[in-house]
Image (tube, rainbow, N blue to C red):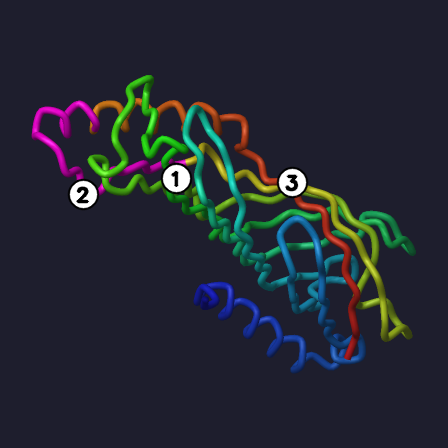
Amino acid sequence: MSFPRTIVAIAATLAATVAASSAHAQIGVGVTASLGTTGAGVHLVVPMERTLNGRFGINYYKHDFDQRSGNIDYDADAKLQTFDALFDWYAFTDTQFRLTAGVVYNGNEVTAKARPNSNGRYLINGQSYNAADVGTLDGDIDFRKAAPYVGIGWGNALTPNQRWNVSADIGAFYQGKAQVDLISRGCRTSQAVCAVLARDVAVEEARLTNELADHKFFPVLRASVSYRF
């Protein structure tokens, strides 16, 4: 897992600018640790204007789960991996309330491997196949990488005269339509049956894509604790 070069460059440049500015040096920078729907995260918070902060960081979480879709059971592995470049605007003087906008590098993905039923068969597009003939049935779900984010929040990691702070975020980023790849690998039967299997797998892939069509927005709920240097 590595940071996208653009986010690293932006964070490093802003941090250097803040350190070089005597006015902003009095404010300092903040580091936050968070937990939420995007996983565990760490962010660097830098001052940009009197009522504007920049937040740059990474969120990560990985977990395994079982999922049934259609007539097929899957062993799934979900990886949540996002990189944030966010800007917090404190619209009202002397308040912790903020409006947030920015862009998220969306590395979220799900990989899955189908399991045959108790009879050792797969039911794909209404057709029954012997698992030994099918080989393996592998799936991958991915989303658009550049995802715009909007949200609201409470708390300011750069509150003057206060080292420790807590904050919360509520928002969403637009990840677009899911890109689903479902592939049968190692068909071990006749060429004619393998051709029919490939068509049925394509129909199942289209059904999965349609099933995920409503998940274009990823909800973000986060609670954070921060320290100002």
Query: For the residue carrying disc 2, how many other residues have a C-alpha within 10 Å: few (<14), some (14-19), or many (20+)?
Result: few
Image location of residue 98, percent across then percent down: 79, 49
Secondary-structure class at tag 1: strand
C-alpha distance separating marks 1 and 3: 30 Å
Magenta span of residues: 179-197
Closer to the N terminus: mark 1 or mark 3?
Answer: 1
Closer to the N terminus: mark 2 or mark 1?
Answer: 1
Q: Residue furthest front?
A: 119
* Residue located beneath label 3 in the image: 219
Q: Describe residue 74's horizontal placement relative to residue 205 as left or right.
A: right
Q: Residue at x 51, y 69 (%)?
A: 8
Mark 2 or 1, closer to the camera:
1
Secondary-structure class at tag 3: strand
* Residue located beneath label 2 in the image: 186
Q: Decide: marks 3, 2 in contact (CB < 8 A)? A: no
Query: For the residue carrying disc 1, how many other residues have a C-alpha within 10 Å: few (<14), some (14-19), or many (20+)?
Result: some
Asked if the magenta segment contains residue 191, the reply would be yes
C-alpha distance separating marks 2 and 1: 15 Å
Closer to the N terminus: mark 3 or mark 2?
Answer: 2
Q: Decide: marks 2, 1 in contact (CB < 8 A)? A: no
Mark 3 or 2, closer to the camera:
2
Image quarter of the N terminus? bottom left
Tag 3: residue type? Pro
Asked if the magenta segment contains residue 85, the reply would be no
Q: Describe residue 134's horizontal placement relative to residue 53 as left or right.
A: left
* Residue located beneath label 1 in the image: 115
Tag 2: residue type? Gly
> Is residue 62 placed above or below 120 in the rendered structure?
below
Tag 1: residue type? Arg
Q: Residue at x 66, y 61 (%)?
A: 54
Secondary-structure class at tag 2: loop
